Amino acid sequence: MLLFPALLATLAAAPVAVPVPAPAQAAPVPETVEQFLEQADALVRIGDEASASSPEADAIRIAIQQAATAYRASLAEAEQRGAPPASCPPPPGQAQLSLGDIAADFRAFPPANRPMPLETAFALVMTLRFPCAGKPK
């Protein structure tokens, strides 16, 4: 019987493991239109305030920045070759496209085309939004 109180005293003196929340895991950067739309839908479910700083928002921003950089590089490469540009977007930072705008354009893709690489889809959207002969969409 004396063992039981001694055991309790020992357990009471032992350090207690307190669960610590794990740091937020980085969301995978979407590589296809389908993955982008899945993450965009996840942001909508999270809500406005929490979504801005979520891993999904970071991943989407990175994906769009990468696609925009690749697209600008393809325009510069076409110009160096003397080929006509695929589109005539405004200078970087002046396009005034929100993630909502881009998501809406991606949602217009038929489901069969949603496995398309994000960079390809972004280039198509820019070509439609900013044609060289005429006004932007």
Image: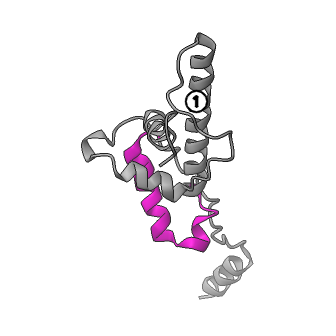
User: Residue beneath label 1, please?
Assistant: 70
74 up-or-down from 127: above or below: above
**Residue 88, percent across and down?**
57, 34
Camera-nearest residue between 42 and 113: 113
Image: magenta residue range: 31-55
**Residue 44, percent across and down?**
47, 67
Q: Residue, x 63% and y 67% (percent of image)?
A: 21
| Three-letter amino acid code of the residue under disc 1 | Ala
State which quarter of the image contains the N terminus.
bottom right
Q: Residue, x 47% and y 49% (percent of image)?
A: 137
**Residue 6, percent across and down?**
68, 82
64 up-or-down from 81: above or below: below
Q: Residue, x 68% and y 39% (percent of image)?
A: 91
Q: Residue 104 is drawn in which quadrant? A: bottom left
Camera-nearest residue between 15 and 42: 42
**Residue 32, percent across and down?**
41, 40
| Magenta span contains residue 49 | yes
Camera-nearest residue between 67 and 17: 67
With 72 as the anchor, is 31 left or right in this view? left
Of all residues shown, which one is farthest toward the front? Answer: 134
**Local secondary structure at mark 1:** helix
Q: Residue, x 64% and y 59% (percent of image)?
A: 23
